[in-house]
Image: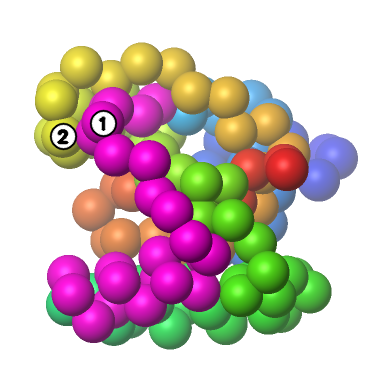
Amino acid sequence: MRAGAGRTPKVGRVWPSRCPAYRSASGFTPRGTLAELLTFTGEEQGNKDIQAQGMATARRLGVNPSRVAARLAVWVSHRRAVANGYNDGNAEPWDVADGRVLAEDGDGGWLVLVAS
């Protein structure tokens, strides 16, 4: 089986090619860097585990979070029902082809760094 061909996302791997991704629009476009986005997630939203996992995974993948635009990271789910639980509740398919999974929230959400 080729890389990314499975059906379940895994942190540090390419989003699986046969796995759908859904995103519920937030109306928010993050500014700044991936490092700033992850710091906000940890310090302002209280998700320090996601902050640590995202930073460590990015670095392990050879990505400098301080040099990547935050808009290139998106939260998605591989289940529409889970994505519907976020923001506006109107989840739509989202293209994260070749994106790398940086973190998971434990509730079915995955932070994916999409190709720039």
Q: CA distance from mark 1 to mark 2?
A: 9 Å
Residue 42 shown in magenta: yes
Is disc 2 placed on a helix, strand or loop? loop
Q: Nearer the viewer, residue 32 or 57?
A: 32
Residue 26, given in percent of the width and then of the height, sits at 24, 34
**Which span of residues is magenta-colored?**
22-45
Q: Judge whether residue 10 can be spotted in this image.
A: no
Instruction: Tell whether 16 sits left or right of 24.
Output: right
Residue in the image at 20% along x and 17% along y: 90
Let me know if residue 26 appears in the view. yes
Q: Is residue 22 above or below residue 111?
A: above
Residue 71 is left or right of residue 83, and the answer is right
Residue ID for mark 1:
27
Q: Give the colour scheme shown.
A: rainbow
Q: State which tag comes first along the sequence, 1 or 2.
A: 1
Q: Answer yes or no: do the residues labelled 1 and 2 have beta carbons within 8 Å?
A: yes
Q: From the top left corner, tell me how far across and down residue 61 is, in percent.
A: 74, 71
Q: Residue flagged by tag 1: what amino acid is it?
A: Gly
Q: Which mark is residue 2?
A: none
In this figure, which residue is indicated by the disc labeled 2? Answer: 87
- The quadrant holding residue 25 is top left
Q: Is-magenta flag for residue 82? A: no
Q: Compared to 27, does 34 lie above or below? A: below
The structure residue drawn at horizontal position 57% and vertical position 82%, both measured from the top left corner, is 56
Specify the quadrant that holds the C terminus.
Answer: top right
Disc 2: CA contacts within 10 A as few (<14), some (14-19) or many (>=20): few
Q: In the image as oriented, which residue stretches furthest toward the front?
A: 32
Q: Nearer the viewer, mark 1 or mark 2?
A: 1
Residue 87 shown left or right of residue 15 in the figure: left
Residue 100: x %, y % from top left:
65, 52
